[in-house]
Amino acid sequence: QAAVQQQEDQHKMAAHQQENLQEHPLCARCGRPAQVVDHIVPHRGREQLFWDESNWQALCKPCHDKKTGEEDSHPTYEY
């Protein structure tokens, strides 16, 4: 059951990502064409933050990879 829900969530997120990239076609950091919908504040498994569209930004892959690398090297968690 959890696997089915995860697959449904992945399809739902993919649809939302395509919509977001159509509305925001340029990278929020550098202005190049965006390819990735990024969570501004890393959700770290928090579902509410994951689905919060105000926490999304369109980024190009290089900017997303750089941002994610910086966040993963200094993770923050809220309890």
Image (spheres, rainbow, N blue to C red):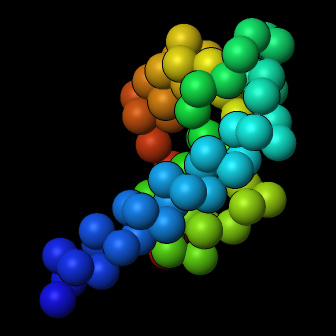
Query: In this rendering, is residue 28 above or below 38?
Result: above
Q: Within the image, what quadrant is residue 53 found in?
A: bottom right
Instruction: Give the residue drawn at x 30%, y 80%.
Output: 5
- Mark yes or no: residue 11 visible: yes
Q: Where is residue 63 in the image (x, y as percent from the top left)?
A: 61, 17
Is 22 placed above or below 49 here?
above
Residue 47: x %, y % from top left: 50, 74
In the picture, measured across the screen, residue 25 lies left or right of residue 76, that is right
| Residue 15 % position (x, y) | 56, 57
Residue 77 in the image: above or below residue 63: below
Q: At 62% across and 19% down in the image, what residue appears?
A: 60
Q: Can residue 77 be spotted in the picture?
A: no
Residue 56 higher or lower than 49, as above or below: above
Task: Specify whether 15 is left or right of 41.
Answer: left
Question: Is 22 placed left or right of 45 in the picture?
Answer: right
Residue drawn at point x = 41 percent, y = 34 percent: 72
Out of 73 and 13, give the one closest to the viewer: 13
Q: Residue at x 28, y 68 (%)?
A: 7
User: 8 and 52: which one is in front?
Assistant: 8
Count of numbered circles on the image = 0
Image quarter where the N terminus lies is: bottom left
